[in-house]
Image (cartoon, grey):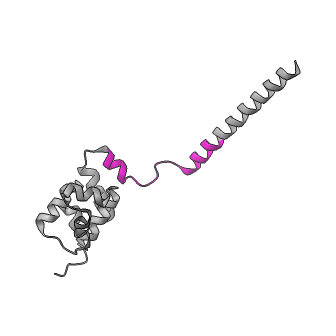
Amino acid sequence: MQQDSKTGHEGKNIKHIREILGIKQNALAIDLGLTQQAASLPEQKETLDAPMLEQVAKALKVPVEAIKNFDEMAALNIICNTSNDTSTLNAINYYPTFDPIDKIIELYERMLQSEKEKVEMLQKLRDQNNQ
């Protein structure tokens, strides 16, 4: 069966969503009650039958529409809006929520503080030895 370009490859869409959610194929297999090898088969199919599609969507905790009409940004939006599990939201928030420059500055300040403490400790030891 030929699909239009909007819907794409349902199996690949499942794989993309699974990876976005950080779910290993083996974990999905367990949720589906399948072996890992059997769970890999839907990811290879261009289209899935409705019962299998619903089962996979339920296991991934996403709507069937997220699989059928996969667009990475749209799928993330659907997942965010339908998920009550904050760990899912954290898993798909793969964009940095911090400024890398701030992290470098923070690291530099910690290293500088550590060096200051070492100098103070060495000065105390020197003063004790001079007494």
**Farthest right residue in view:** 130
Q: Tell me where residue 19 appears, x and y as whole percent.
A: 34, 60
Q: Tell me where residue 4 appears, x and y as whole percent.
A: 21, 78
Image: magenta residue range: 87-108
- The question of residue 62 being in magenta is answered with no
- The question of residue 95 being in magenta is answered with yes
Q: Choose top left, top right, bottom left or bottom right for residue 21.
A: bottom left
Q: Choose top left, top right, bottom left or bottom right for residue 95.
A: bottom left
The residue that appears at 19% across and 63% down in the rendered structure is 65
The residue that appears at 26% across and 51% down in the rendered structure is 81
Left/right of residue 18 with respect to residue 96 in the rendered view: left
> Does the rendering let one see residue 70?
no
In which quadrant of the rendered image does the N terminus lie? bottom left
> Does the rendering let one see residue 100?
yes
Left/right of residue 104 with respect to residue 10 in the rendered view: right
Q: Tell me where residue 3 appears, x and y as whole percent.
A: 20, 78
In which quadrant of the rendered image does the C terminus lie? top right
**Farthest top residue in view:** 131
In the displayed structure, would residue 86 be above or below residue 22?
above
**Farthest bottom residue in view:** 2
Q: Predominant secondary structure in magenta? A: helix
The residue that appears at 71% across and 31% down in the rendered structure is 117
The residue that appears at 66% across and 40% down in the rendered structure is 111
Left/right of residue 109 with respect to residue 89 in the rendered view: right
Q: How many marks?
A: 0
Q: Tell me where residue 110 appears, x and y as whole percent.
A: 63, 38
